[in-house]
Amino acid sequence: MSEENVQERNRNLQKAQRIIQELMVTLNQKYEVAKQMMVMYEYMNRRLIEANIKNDISIVEEVEGFVIEFRDTWEEVIRLTRQKQFKGDQV
């Protein structure tokens, strides 16, 4: 792997870590679901560090799977919330 590719991989993984860290900072810890999400975010952040150190794409793919699952869950929450709001406006 060329030095340029190593630097790009490092930049991208650090960017992903910063995104996860920002999500961690925004959690309101007074809710149980936030505490559960924090555990998951911490795990994903550790795995991204490990992926960067070990140059292991399988770890990146593992974290990507979790991120996609989170995204899909939030999309469903938004859809259901909008649907509920729409029904409330119709009454």
Image (cartoon, rainbow, N blue to C red):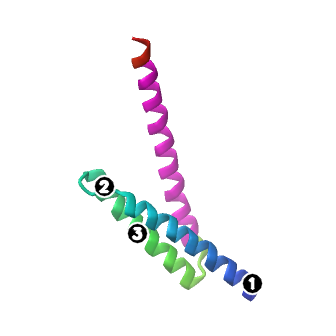
Q: Which tag, 2 or 1, sits closer to the chain's start? A: 1
Q: Magenta stretch?
A: 59-87
Examine the rendered structure and indicate whether residue 37 appears above or below residue 13.
Answer: above
The secondary structure that most of the magenta stretch takes on is helix
Which label belongs to residue 28? Answer: 2
Q: Residue furthest bottom?
A: 3
Determine the secondary structure under disc 1.
helix
Q: Which tag, 2 or 3, sits closer to the chain's start? A: 2
Q: Which tag, 1 or 3, sits closer to the chain's start? A: 1
Q: Nearer the viewer, mark 2 or mark 1?
A: 2
Mark 3 neighbour class, 10 Å CA radius: few under 14, some 14 to 19, many 20 or more: few
Which label belongs to residue 86? Answer: none
Identified by mark 2, the residue type is: Asn
Which label belongs to residue 4? Answer: 1
Please tell me which residue is depicted at 43% across the width and 60% down the height of the picture. 23
Rendered location of residue 32, percent (x, y)? 25, 52
Q: Which residue is mark 3?
A: 43
Quadrant assignment, res 38: bottom left
Cα gap from disc 1 to disc 3, whole angstroms:
28 Å
Cα gap from disc 2 to disc 3, whole angstroms:
18 Å
Check if residue 52 falls in the magenta segment.
Answer: no
Cα gap from disc 2 to disc 1, whole angstroms:
39 Å
The answer to the question of whether label 2 and label 3 lie on touching residues, with beta carbons closer than 8 A, is no
Query: Which sits in the foreground, 91 or 3?
Result: 91
Rendered location of residue 27, percent (x, y)? 35, 57
Question: Can residue 8 be seen at all in this image of the molecule?
Answer: yes
Identified by mark 1, the residue type is: Glu
Question: Can residue 1 be seen at all in this image of the molecule?
Answer: no
